[in-house]
Amino acid sequence: MYKYNCRKCPIRNRCIDEGTNAPSIKEIIRQAFAARTDTLETWGALQPHCLLLKAEEERVRTAPRESMLSRRLRQARETREQAAKAFSTSAGRKPDYLQPVSLVSPQAKPQPKETHPDAGETRAARPEVSAIEDIAADGRLLPRWLTIVVSGRHIALPADKDLVLGRFDPNFGVPPDIDLTYEDQGARTVSRQHARIVEAAGRHTIEDMGSRHGLFVNGEQVRSGPPYQLQLGDRIELGSSVQLVYDRMPAHLMDFAPTASMNHVLVITPTGRRLAITPPKDVLIGRSDRYVDFAPDVDLSREGEVAVRVSRRHAIITWRDSVPHLEDLGSGFGTRLNGQTLFIGQAASLKPGDHIWLGGCVLAYDIEV
Amino acid sequence: MKQNLPVLSDDTVMSAIVWPADGKDMVLVPGGTGLMGSNDGSPKHQPEHDVHVVDFYIDRWPVTNAEYKRFADETNHPVPNYDVSWCDTRGYNWDPETRVYPEGKADHPAVLVTWEDAMAYTAWVGKRLPTEAEWERAARGLGGRRYPWGNEFVLGRCNCKEVGLGATSPVGQFSPEGDTPGGVVDMLGNVWEWTNSLYRPYPYDPDDGRESRQARGFRVLRGASWVNDANVVHCLSRLDGDFQFYNNVGFRCAVSPEN
């Protein structure tokens, strides 16, 4: 009948104190709980001012409206959790955290079957791009990058590493390597795991990772399933909000040699905040904490929940010959550069378009001339 | 090899035992409903609320280098040896060839250990990490004292910044004045101790997922260390472990009675 169990409530004493019953009634209530003679009537006296109910109302009032997808995901998650709880609290068994630790590997989850609804369709033939313009003097392919149309942000495409594009959500698995939260703000059609770009011999393919609103290249949808080979100049669209162009990196940035006229910029991609960094000052990136009296040079705690897995001392940018280098400082959730994990003690040089993933919060490094 | 404790009935539960697998003293912390947190001070430990903790045994002192070496030898677990710019590991690194802890530190708490290292140790010895609520109960007792010895800070009862050692100390160096009434040693100062709990806001609820050993998140550290000053060195302090290891972070184990 009552939602919360007053006898087991951890803040019962505060609730009694702050309620509006007369002091003599409060005393009677306290004694009833102490003697475990509290009845539903006793609880009834506390219900009108139940602090937990008030907090819940507040949360419901201020919470954003739920979409169909998030409701389905939440219900699926709740049924899973209930099933797990029902199993673990079977009669006589201690809760897991009171059991001794046993290091057995978790059961492998079965892979969801990939459906290929359009396996029979053929795509319109596209003309082969001449290979000549694509190759540099030394015979290698010219490096490619993506440019986000609305913000002008560049995304460097790494060699031999997949890149996941999507939107950050602290409650969901592994945050994507490239966070498009900021560019997605208007329409909100970018999924958490939207697309994956895979490199093979200098060229790139893109595949849909089961996004809700789809992946399109030059107007045609790339459905879940076989990856799509990208060609120079292709226009990629994630959902209906974010457009990227796949093109060659400009020649003057390929052998990155910084000059005096360059401005080094760090962009906090989920919020669009831009920061200038200048040699030779080291840039310590992390999260401030007054409790232990710590403040990094770049404080990501201002960015809200996207920084929930950023450590206080997460990463540092140091300068060698005016080229910035990135190093992880033993952070809890790790640092990745263009999707590649940086190991402790390993310092990697940054080039324009590089994306720095700090426990899910993604920074972009770029230069402005 | 783990041997099971004899089955104990309620009236024969012993207040102190020796755990067979590692020969370590463990102290019984009586269960019951008592205070956790406090209404003043850092918002991280607010609000004060009641928690119910069941009887459990806790290691009398943190896991020492000598104890960790036995574990590393028997399981071939890597020994800590790091060269990083963000933590001074000189004096704490183990010798990678001989797999021995730094000279003279056999009785110091093992540091440079990750939460995963601590979990591997507990799996080997047949114990577990204490939950955050259990750790605080062991340190504060049912009445919610602020320090293991009472409610006032007393210089010289634990290894903290004011003492000026600038390093870990052998366990028991500040006994018996720094001990809890039950005889638990080095709860405050010396090293922060890993717990089983995820760092989440109060009030504490063991059933909301924060005690999941598989979930991702920062784990709670308790007890402050040789680095911290009196503002932080008290039983309420909780630190989110958003790093892999440090030279002032160790752990101690807990276990529930078999009955």
Image (cartoon, grey):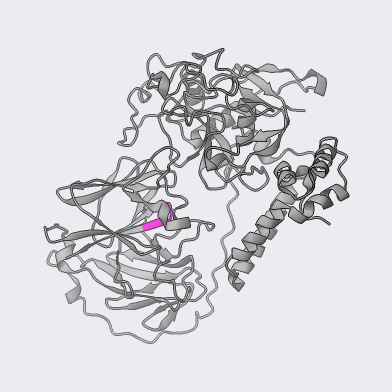
Quadrant the C terminus of chain B occupies: top right
Residue A44 percent location from the top left of the image: 83, 52
Front position in the image: B250 or A90: B250
Front position in the image: B13 or A234: B13
The span shown in magenta is A358-362
Please tell me whether residue A225 is drawn above or below residue B167 in the rendered image.
below
Tell whether B155 sits left or right of A141.
Answer: right
Residue shown at 42%/16% (left/top)?
B105
Magenta stretch prevailing secondary structure: strand
- Which image quadrant for residue A63? bottom right
Residue B1 percent location from the top left of the image: 61, 23
Taking the image as drawn, is residue A272 in sight? yes
Determine if the magenta segment contains residue A128: no
Front position in the image: B228 or B81: B228
Residue shown at 18%/50% (left/top)?
A279
Taking the image as drawn, is residue B126 in sight? no
Residue A162 percent location from the top left of the image: 38, 61
Residue shown at 76%/52% (left/top)?
A4
Front position in the image: B35 or A155: B35
Q: How many numbered marks appear?
A: 0
Please tell me whether residue A300 is drawn above or below residue B190 in the rendered image.
below
Tell whether B40 sits left or right of B11.
Answer: left
Residue A336 percent location from the top left of the image: 36, 52
Tell whether B257 sits left or right of B164.
Answer: right
- Which image quadrant for residue A255? bottom left
